Image (cartoon, rainbow, N blue to C red):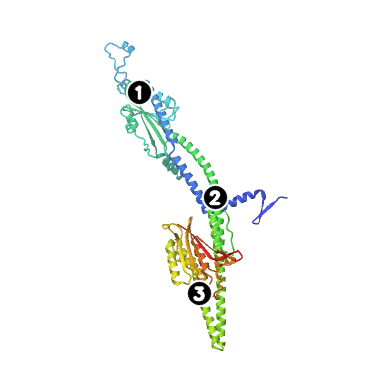
Amino acid sequence: MRDETPVHGRRWPRPFDWVRRTGQFFFTLSFSSLTRRILSLNLAGLLALSTSILYLSQFRAGLIDARAQSLLVQAEIIAGAIAASATVETNTITIDPDRLLDLKPGESYGPPDEYALLDFPINPERVAPVLRRLISPTKTRARIYDRDGVLILDSRSLYGRGDVLRFDLPPPAAEKPGIVERAMIAIRTWLNRGDLPLYRELGPENGNGYQEVAQSLKGQKSSMVRINDRGEVIVSVSVPVQRFRAIYGSLMLSTQGDDIDQMVTAERLAILKVFGVAAVVMFVLSVLLASTIAGPVRRLADAAERVRRRIRARVEIPDFTKRRDEIGHLSGALREMTDSLYNRIEAIERFAADVSHELKNPLTSLRSAVETLPLAKTDSSRARLLSVIEHDVKRLDRLISDISDASRLDAELQRQDAAQVDLRRLLTTLTLVANETRLGNNAPVEVKFEGPATDQFSVPGHDSRLGQVISNLLSNAQSFSCEGGKVRIVCRRRKADIEIVVEDEGPGIREDALEKIFERFYTDRPHQGFGQNSGLGLSISKQIVEAHGGKIWAENRVGPRGEDSEPTIGGARFIVRLPAT
């Protein structure tokens, strides 16, 4: 029995599962914008490099130089052969002794025929066989010009004994090159042209129109590289045909058609093959790179989308923090942000529940008093009910004010720009205000700064909110102080932090309440009546300190030992530690 796996209503053999999975993987990556960008940029860079290699090929330049040098050597050999066997002395008289003996009386010895009077420095009849033997094995074109730059012989017109001349005439209605051919010619011209001049065929009387021919007629060998209208590179050289320093003409050798281009094309095809292999490797590497980037980013984006839609239920953000790269940092930041978001949502829900609970108590009491007021029979009962109503209204007003302050605290801290706060001046000012008001058992306040007088006690933050923290701590310390007690403020530097300590001489804090006192709506004041405090002061102070990157905690001061030799509580101590500049 064959094991098959159903896929979308069809059953695939298990050995082909990897093919299906690979196809799905590439299909998924193909729709990723990041994958397309990575692949496009990598291939674009590789394409630019290959194009520059094709355009600025050193092989082509070296090949052209080598071809020009070989043509010069070949031209010098052919020119020497022509000068040795195919030139004539036009200023000498050749005498045949046998003909002189055959002269009759009265006859004179003159030129053998009328053609002997013509000036032929290079004899075409002697040049043709020599040129045919030397040029035929090579793929070059040879042209011989006389001293005036007139064409004497062209290797294209040479034919041997028994050869039939055949000239291919263009058709009556010649068609223009097609689009593909024109495109190939344009590409080849663009690749080969550069700063090369255009090659043109000149008439037989215009040999001096070729710069190299004109130079060779002056006794200098010369070479030129041009390009024809089909984008083919033409290399031509010209050397003088001379004998005993006498210049009889010029020999011009040039390449035929695309022999250089064929070699360059073969080299470019090899480069393109290398480009193809490199492109495949680049494609695979780009896909693998994209899979390590696009895949995790897509999973993080999907998780963030689920967080947005399912705000009531916690959504786990994929953990890539083991990766020591930007994806790992992004994953860690998103996880921390999501945890902070959920914590903030839960805090808001708890805050709303606490607010609802705290508001219901005075409202219930107020409702009961209002409903009972019409039923009161005596003035004392009505006065007591009115007192309860007044107390509940004040309590509601205090609760609403503190709740409003706590609810807009985060937004206010994020909206305002932090500045340098001089704690020395701030604490001195608050101490003066506290001593003027003398709240809570008339307890005086004194401040002390430990360290050099020139030491700067400054922290980045909001002076009004930090002043609110110190005011809350001073108010609590004064309210819990005993008669004749003091409240002390000590400010000191702890390495990179500034520490502010507020101490009182009150009853201290119960051990089980050292953490609870910073919770919302928690209050423990047995010496005060119910409802005199909202229980948000220390909670707001903690929120402000943590928003400034600091910490706040409470502990008890150790007092003198009692009758049982056990240490007693000498008061409460609140410690605020803020990062300094």
Please, what is the three-letter code of the amino acid marked with disc 3? Arg
- Which comes before the other along the chain, label 2 or label 3? 2
Q: Does residue 177 appear in the picture of this structure? A: no
Q: Secondary structure at mark 3?
A: helix
Figure quadrant of residue 347 = bottom right
Residue 547 placement (x, y as % from top left): 49, 62
Please, what is the three-letter code of the amino acid marked with disc 1? Asn
Residue 287 placement (x, y as % from top left): 55, 48
Q: Does residue 85 appear in the picture of this structure? A: yes
Label 2, label 3: how far apart the Cα atoms are: 51 Å
Residue neighbourhood size for the residue with mark 3, other residues' Cα within 10 Å, grouped as few (<14), some (14–19), many (≥20): some
| Residue 31 vertical placement versus 185 (above, below) | below
Figure quadrant of residue 102 = top left
Please, what is the three-letter code of the amino acid marked with disc 2? Arg
Residue 508 placement (x, y as % from top left): 55, 67
Mark 3, residue position: 398
* Depth order, front residue of 287/311: 311
Label 1, label 3: how far apart the Cα atoms are: 128 Å
Residue 183 placement (x, y as % from top left): 44, 44
* Depth order, front residue of 246/11: 11
Mark 2, residue position: 324
Foreground: disc 1 or disc 3: 3
Residue neighbourhood size for the residue with mark 2, other residues' Cα within 10 Å, grouped as few (<14), some (14–19), many (≥20): few
Q: Residue at x 39, y 40 (%)?
A: 194
Quarter holding the C terminus?
A: bottom left
| Residue 285 vertical placement versus 362 (above, below) | above
- Which comes before the other along the chain, label 2 or label 1? 1
Mark 1, residue position: 123
Residue farthest bottom in this picture: 377
